[in-house]
Image (cartoon, rainbow, N blue to C red):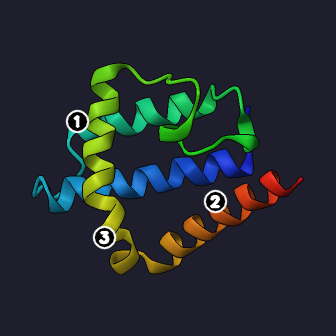
Amino acid sequence: MSHGRIEEEKNIIAIMVGYYCRKKEKNQIICSDCRELIEYAQARLDHCPFGDEKTACKKCSIHCYKPDMRERMKKVMSYAGPRMLFVFPSIALRHYFCFTCFFRFRKAQ
């Protein structure tokens, strides 16, 4: 099941985990643990029952991540998320405004 929104989420996850791995963990290339996290997150997105209607994973009513993987992703997001605006501003702004506008529009209907 391939959706434009899901594919964009998968791309953003890869960027954020890659940034975390290079900057926080000081790796030159993505380590096997971070590669595993990217693959796991992308597999979860491939099977998301909400598809293009999905919310942010932390706001989802179905938590499909295993607890250890969820903790790892939270660690990545808390490090990379705030830095995205400075490192990848166009991606961060697009992601923020697309989610914000999408959910405001959905609530208004």
Who is closer to the viewer here, 88 or 66? 66
Percent x, y of residue 28 = 15, 58
User: What amino acid does circle 2 point to?
Assistant: Phe
Percent x, y of residue 57 = 52, 39
Relative to 65, is 107 above or below?
below
Q: For mark 3, does the 10 Å Cα neighbourhood hold few (<14), some (14 to 19), or many (20 or more) residues?
A: some
The nearer-to-camera label among 3 and 2 is 2
In this rendering, position of residue 92 left or right of residue 82: right
Q: Which quadrant is home to the N terminus?
A: top right
Percent x, y of residue 30 = 24, 49
N-terminal of the two: label 3 or label 1?
1
Who is closer to the viewer here, 60 or 81? 60
Residue at the image position 64 percent from the left and 59 percent from the top: 99
Q: Quadrant of residue 16?
A: bottom left
Residue at the image position 34 percent from the left and 80 percent from the top: 86
User: What amino acid does circle 3 point to?
Assistant: Arg
The disc label shown at residue 32, or none: 1
N-terminal of the two: label 3 or label 2?
3
N-terminal of the two: label 1 or label 2?
1
- For label 2, the residue is 99
